[in-house]
Amino acid sequence: MTDIDAFTDRLDPDMCVVTATVGAERSGCLVGFFSQCSIRPVRFAVWLSKANHTYGLARRADCLAVHLLTREQHGQAALFGGRTGDRTDKFSRAAWREGYGGSAVLEDVAAWFVGTVESRVDGGDHVGFVLTPVEWGSGSDGPLLRLGDVLDIDPGHPA
């Protein structure tokens, strides 16, 4: 354990699923590093691991879709967090529809938005994608899925 673990081990952030689409290619992953990063204009940042299959597609995408899950949707989190897109077609196992810019929008989630990629920031082993929402919606109610709820999921692409 490092000294900073005393700080990071106390965090229990909300989790989300980020999807990326380029042409007919789709990918998605479970993400714990994301936040609103601007009020005017409203913008969000999502951080994708460079080791993740979704990152390879996201760096070529014009927009990304960000989905909040409820604690009842642990199975959806396990699909997008515990499987890798270079071996599993996650979208054949999940309900989704096409959204803005051809994005893959998951159905039956707590809330979602599609955002255009404004910039990318290299943060080390993750790259931040700054997004401006252009389409959004909401769905199921309930407490949001948090990091503590998904610690049992082994990453599909461990870092």
Image (cartoon, rainbow, N blue to C red):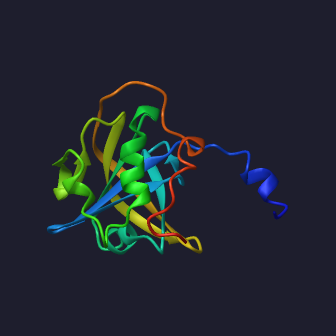
Q: Give me the residue at 36% from left, 72% from top.
A: 59
Q: Give me the residue at 43% from left, 41% from top.
A: 74
Q: Quadrant of the N terminus?
A: bottom right
Residue 128's spot in the image, x, y percent?
Answer: 49, 64
Numbered marks: total: 0
Q: Quadrant of the C terminus?
A: bottom right
Does 24 appear above or below 14?
A: below
Residue 54's spot in the image, x, y percent?
Answer: 36, 67
Residue 57's spot in the image, x, y percent?
Answer: 31, 71
The extreme right residue here reads: 3
Does 100 appear above or below 107?
A: below
Q: Give me the residue at 31% from left, 73% from top.
A: 86
Q: Give me the residue at 46% from left, 44% from top.
A: 40
Residue 58's spot in the image, x, y percent?
Answer: 34, 68
Front one among 78 and 50? 78
The extreme top residue here reads: 141
Q: Is residue 69 visible?
A: yes
Q: Is residue 67 visible?
A: no
